[in-house]
Amino acid sequence: MDPDDALQAARRRFGNRGLLHEKSREMWGWNRMDELGRNIRHAARVLRKSPAFTAIAILSLTLGIGANTAVFSFVHAIVLKKLPVAAPERLVSITQQNEMFHMENCCFPYTFYRELRRQDPDFEDVLALNSAEVNFTDHEQTERLSAELVSGSYFQMFGVHPAAGRLLDAFGDSLPVGRTR
């Protein structure tokens, strides 16, 4: 076969030389880096040409990243982070379901707590708590606050230690309501 005819036949058989060159570059992975470089240069040119758009884009990114950081921090603190107690896997919550009022975690009397604490050897310790709305008065201002009424073992069971002074203890459970030692 004539060399010119052989070259033409080979080109027809193998295909476009430029296309093969591009495909081999893609296989080596440099094409993606080249494309990334071109995209960054193009974005810089566009942002330089329109400063108002650039300011809005940067402000939008800042707000979006800030909002996501705040939401993730909240989720991390509430959902993902372990309880700050000595052995959170050993905590148990006892609830009662009231079928008549369709309520859960309802209405354990304080005497039930005292008897459970006194008689049940299966629990290392028992605590009681109840949510309440209270009035807080400071001079002439009164403010409505949410509070928790807790038993004396509350802080000890969660391993909380005071920075100064003392915390509620089990002795406080034996005092009548409204009295302190």
Image: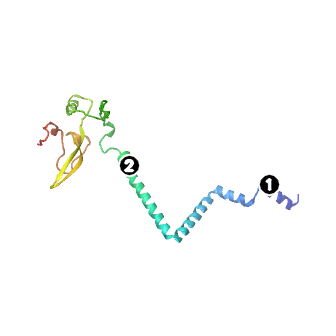
Q: Nearer the viewer, residue 68 or 120?
A: 68
Expressed as whole percent of the image width and height from the top left, the position of residue 23 reads: 68, 56
* Residue at the outermost right position: 1
> Is 49 or 162 nearer to us in this picture?
49
- Residue at 35 percent across and 47 percent down: it is 78
Q: At which x and y percent is residue 111?
A: 19, 31
Tell me the quarter of the image containing the N terminus.
bottom right
- Residue shown at 53%/71% (left/top)? 49
Q: Nearer the viewer, residue 56 or 95?
A: 56
Residue to which mark 1 is pinned? 13
- Residue type marked 2: His
Q: Residue at x 52, y 70 (%)?
A: 50
Total labels: the figure holds 2
Q: Residue farthest to the front?
A: 100
Q: Amino acid at mark 1?
A: Arg
- Asked if residue 4 lies left or right of residue 165, the reply is right
Whether label 1 touches label 2, CB < 8 Å:
no
Which residue position holds label 2? 76
Residue 175 coordinates in the image, percent (x, y): 13, 38
User: Is tag 1's residue or tag 2's residue first in the polypeptide sequence?
Assistant: 1
Image quadrant in which you'd find residue 128: top left
Mark 1 lies on a secondary structure that is: helix
